Amino acid sequence: MRLSLLFATLLTLVFSPVVAEETLALIKPDAVKQNKANEIIHLIRENGLEINQVKIIHMTPEEAGHFYKKHKDRPFFQELTDYMSSGPLIAMILESDNAISRYRELIGTTDPKEALPGTLRALYGTDRGENAVHGSESADAARDEIRYFFCENHKRATPAFKTQGQSKPKIASKIGSACFFMSK
């Protein structure tokens, strides 16, 4: 009896799919404008993070405000939304074992002057505001942020409602358990 239980456990371990963790990565407008995206992507991949989906978008101030709504009462909110809507950015879904912590370690602390040498923010950021990259802080944040940018075609997201007549890339937001496209 014990041998069959051991065999069943081993079969489960061998044939169970390993689900890697996902996180959202953004290459912010300052790094895109300075043509640093290729170098950043190279370092992301060199550090064992797989890029599953990518899109280039240019957020409106309203879209940036919705994405950073948790900071709306902070004194830097307006500056942040103006900056994030100042030019195109690159949104990516990264995947690997411990993707969130691995990417957070790779990007470094918010302030590039305090970030460890070799981290993305130390290499490419200029200050706390223009710090080159964004990474999800937790599993819940990663899920919500991925749905925000990739809801319409992300394999793990709730299906999005289609909108008509929009020519620019769509940015989705999560409301409850469903995703909706932001309307203008």
Image: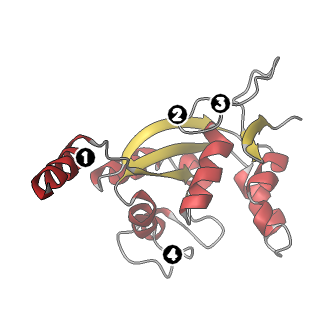
Q: Where 149 falls versus 43 (above or below)?
A: above
Quickly name the residue at label 3. 152
- Three-letter amino acid code at the position of disc 3: Glu
Does the image show residue 67? yes
What residue sits 79% from the left and 72% below the top?
A: 76
What residue sits 46% from the left and 71% below the top?
A: 108
Mark closest to the chain's N terminus, 1 or 4 = 1
- Mark 4 or 2, which is nearer the eye? 2
Q: Measuring from the top left, give residue 137's x and y in whole percent.
A: 56, 66
Taking the view exactly as shown, the residue that stands out farthest to the front is 1
- Mark 2 or 3, which is nearer the eye? 2
Q: Measuring from the top left, give residue 109's x and y in whole percent.
A: 51, 75
- Three-letter amino acid code at the position of disc 1: Thr
Q: Where 33 falls versus 100 (above or below)?
A: above
In the figure, is residue 14 to the left or right of 132?
left
Q: What element carries label 4?
A: loop
- The one of 96 and 5 positioned closer to us in this rendering: 5
In the figure, is residue 121 to the left or right of 20?
right
| Marks 3 and 1 in Cβ contact (< 8 Å) | no
Mark closest to the chain's N terminus, 3 or 1 = 1
Label 3 – label 4 distance at C-alpha: 31 Å
Label 4 – label 2 distance at C-alpha: 30 Å
Q: Where 161 falls versus 63 (above or below)?
A: above
Q: Measuring from the top left, give residue 14's x and y in whole percent.
A: 19, 45
Numbered badge on residue 109: 4
Numbered badge on residue 155: 2
Within-10-Å neighbours for mark 2: few <14, some 14–19, many 20+? few
Numbered badge on residue 12: 1
